[in-house]
Image (cartoon, helix red, strand yellow):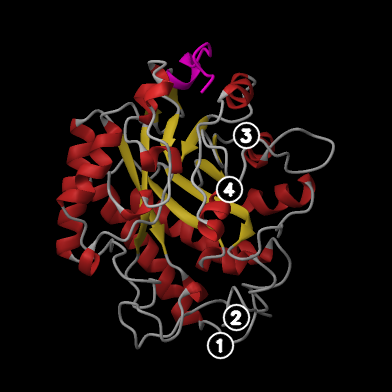
Amino acid sequence: MADKSLDVERLFQPVDLGKLTLSNRIVMAPMTRGFSPNGIPGADVAGYYRRRAGNEVGLIVTEGTLINHPAAAEGLGRPNFYGQQSLDAWAKVVEGVHQAGGKIIPQLWHVGMARQIGGQNPNPEAPPIGPSGIDVMSGAKVTKPMTQDEIGYVVNAFAEAARQAKHLGFDGIELHGAHGYLIDQFFWANTNQRDDEYGGDLIARTRFATEIIKACRVAVGDDFPIVFRFSQWKMGHYQEKLAQNPAELSAFLTPLSEAGVDIFHASTRRYWEPEFVDSPLNLAGWTKKLTGKPTITVGSVGVDTNFIEFFMEGKGANHSSLAPLLDRLKQGEFDLVAVGRALLADPAWAAKIHQNRVNELILFAKGAEETLS
């Protein structure tokens, strides 16, 4: 562990992003956990988030929380963002994080066609929904395309979740438009083969997302931050790209930005990899350059393996130098840094980094995802 001599102060400077002011630039990345029986986060979940807030994490993005639609989930134990019991529980999470000095936003989520027919899911009778009924992994058509009424229902469900987030005292929302889930299924030509206004070229395929963003903006007003998470890659399709070059990325991002996104969370597997040829900028860097909006970078921060190596091969991870990250942050390539597995393993990761206690870090290892440390 060789970060003792690094000047990490830039990571820990307060930052004003207009609608959102944070004590520092460290974000807890959203990570699916599955510890909410019947969709209700308990005291263990509240403690899990509070511990990170109390150890110098500036902003927490919760695990994916389910909007009010019967087919929103894939798997059991995912937290709902609807229903009085779940909302009351989230209010306690918010209270704890705020008492610890942090800020928190929920990630609002619908898995779409990632839901497996016959799987262990809430409402098992509800079939998956998606733009064209195409399974993300296999490419097979397994259900019918969403109707206009179904699209409207889901748009309204996202907006209602956003309204509830503001009511509960959250500091903003994040819309999950990445990784091959429902919103991203509308973006991707492989899963969106519609011939109506929701299909067509890349710009046309942003319509579903822009309707959600606009509806959320109406629900929360002008001053409540909306973060939008997107990615090029999809589950099982890690080399895919929605945009092959900066011009295509600009065409994709512009409608989302104009619809009301305040901050873009650009999800990559490795933050140091350039997104396009002939430029060192990563996806967050290009997004900031093209939109002028603040961005969050993410992808193997503080660890020496990517998450696919963990899920596919069971690999743990050692601490990785933050020097390249700090150089990029100093250059203004992005504004915030999301940390995933390193923070999952060690709730005090940020505080230890700030205090140059890297030799005390708890390293991410197989089994870390099975507890709420």
Instruction: Point out the tag, 3 or 4, that comes first from the N-terminus.
Output: 4
Circle 4: element type: helix
**Pointer 4 residue:** 258
In the image: residue 151, left or right of residue 35:
right
CA distance separating discs 3 and 1:
40 Å
- Asked whether, in this view, residue 298 is left or right of residue 138, the answer is left
SS for callout 2: loop
Percent coordinates x, y for residue 40 in the rendering: 20, 62
Q: Nearer the viewer, mark 3 or mark 4?
A: 3
Q: Which residue is mark 2?
A: 134
Q: Crowding near pointer 3: few (<14 within 10 Å), some, many (20+)?
A: few
| Residue 246 within the magenta-colored segment of the rendering | no
Query: Which dot marks residue 292?
Result: 3
Q: CB of mark 1 within 8 Å of CB of mark 2? A: yes
Residue shown at the point (71%, 72%) measured from the top left: 200
Magenta span: 1-12
